[in-house]
């Protein structure tokens, strides 16, 4: 029997909160009818929204707080002032083991700082990493880290690879995901010492439930040749923002091109089904939800500008992770690599 999942929701985080958040969890509830929600926020705003969805109302508990983490708040401020905010209380619910996952569309830096401070890192993990799915020619791949750690050593990269592979097994259903390190070339001699040292460890870790394929370059990310792309947070964040910007560029240029003349407008009518599929594939709302991996608890980050459908997609991923016990999988894989005769890495 599937485990009954409880989601702790920051109802006040995000550009369109709380309306978007409540609509999003209502959609998720219709898809996962056994899920329950702890909703943290201003009851005067949240209650009328939940009352619009009878099924959600019966499965939700509202915990009142007027304290909200603003989008401009610095992580240091959040740590000092916001543990009783809707965001902080949602994380606390995971720490207290009354919720399986916390989810917020609010301030990323504050969410990261509060999550790390309140939940702490798992044994064997030096730093948590932010992971998210990305559209590719073959469906979806994931990349980490996407900004939590600007600089990483080889130990961090190995840990990211283990966590990323466990995520793909859980959320994307790949029993033995392919994993690669992002590098400036695919040859063994290229790249920084930390990347090459991490590759040496992963090559020797044959008992892990992953297939390490070596290095990939930036132009391979969108091909979908590998399931997990591992890099430091600086490079990963730049790559993610570049990919998002390129997707917007392609869709905007296509839109302009099809409006340029009568003939192109007629061509658009013929091409509309295919363009609709392209738009859906590139839509960030269909690939929504980053996760802070490596903590003693699950915290999901939704896009701040997400719509309700996108938020429900993030909730669905959160449910998958909780149902499949992602944290336990990561712990088991970390134990596997620490008991192997792998070379020590400290570069």
Image (cartoon, rainbow, N blue to C red):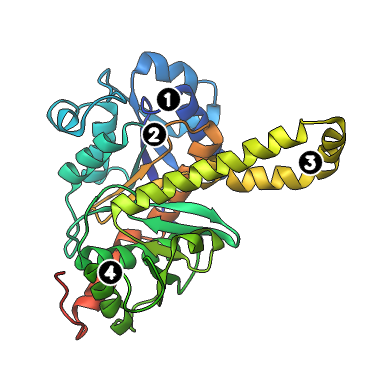
Instruction: Tell me where residue 250 appears, x and y as whole percent.
Output: 62, 43
Q: Earlier in the sequence, mark 1 or mark 3?
A: 1
Query: In the image, which is nearer the foreground, mark 1 or mark 3?
Result: 3
Q: Earlier in the sequence, mark 2 or mark 1?
A: 1
Q: Which residue, given by chain and number where applicable, does mark 3 sit on?
A: 272
Instruction: Tell me where residue 331 appears, x and y as whole percent.
Output: 25, 66
Which mark is on residue 195?
4
343 lies left or right of 171: left
Of residues 200 and 207, the one nearer the viewer is 200
Placement of 189 over or under 330, stated as above or below = below
Q: Earlier in the sequence, mark 2 or mark 4?
A: 2
Count residues near mark 4 (Cα–Cα under 10 Å), then give few for <14, some for 14-19, many for 20+.
many
Q: Which residue, given by chain and number where applicable, does mark 1 sit on?
A: 15
Marks 2 and 4 sit apart, C-alpha to C-alpha, by: 32 Å
Q: Secondary structure at mark 3?
A: helix
Q: Secondary structure at mark 1?
A: loop
Q: Earlier in the sequence, mark 4 or mark 1?
A: 1
Task: Give me the residue at 46% from left, 30% from top.
Answer: 305
Query: In the image, which is nearer the foreground, mark 2 or mark 3?
Result: 3
Q: Which residue, given by chain and number where applicable, does mark 2 sit on?
A: 105
């Amino acid at each position: 029997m599937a485990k009954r999942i409880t989601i702790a929701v920051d109802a006040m985080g995000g550009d369109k909160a709380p309306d978007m958040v409540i609509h999003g969890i209502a959609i998720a509830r219709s898809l996962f009818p056994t899920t329950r929600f702890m909703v943290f926020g201003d009851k005067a705003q949240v209650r009328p929204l939940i009352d619009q969805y009878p099924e959600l109302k019966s499965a939700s508990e509202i915990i009142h707080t007027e304290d909200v983490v603003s989008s401009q708040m610095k992580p240091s401020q959040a740590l000092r002032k916001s543990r009783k905010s809707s965001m902080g209380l949602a994380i606390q619910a995971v720490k207290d083991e009354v919720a399986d996952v916390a989810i917020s569309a609010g301030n990323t830096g504050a969410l990261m700082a509060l999550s790390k401070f309140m939940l702490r890192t798992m044994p064997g993990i030096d730093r948590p990493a932010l992971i998210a799915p990305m559209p590719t020619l073959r469906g979806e791949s994931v990349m980490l880290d996407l900004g939590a750690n600007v600089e990483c050593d080889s130990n961090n990269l190995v840990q990211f690879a283990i966590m990323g592979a466990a995520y793909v097994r859980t959320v994307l259903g790949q029993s033995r995901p392919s994993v690669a390190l992002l590098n400036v070339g695919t040859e063994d001699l290229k790249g920084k010492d930390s990347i090459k040292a991490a590759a040496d460890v992963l090559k020797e870790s044959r008992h892990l439930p992953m297939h390490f394929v070596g290095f990939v370059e930036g132009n391979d990310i969108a091909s979908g040749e590998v399931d997990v792309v591992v890099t430091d947070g600086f490079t990963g964040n730049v790559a993610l923002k570049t990919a998002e910007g390129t997707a917007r560029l392609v869709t905007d240029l296509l839109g302009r091109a099809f409006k340029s003349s009568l003939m192109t407008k007629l061509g658009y009518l013929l091409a509309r089904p295919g363009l609709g599929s392209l738009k859906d594939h590139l839509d960030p709302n269909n690939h929504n939800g980053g996760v802070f991996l490596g903590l003693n608890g699950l915290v999901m980050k939704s896009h701040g500008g997400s719509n309700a459908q996108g938020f429900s997609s993030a909730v669905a991923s959160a449910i998958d992770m909780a149902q499949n016990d992602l944290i336990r999988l990561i712990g088991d894989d970390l134990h596997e690599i620490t008991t192997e005769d792998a070379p020590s890495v400290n570069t």
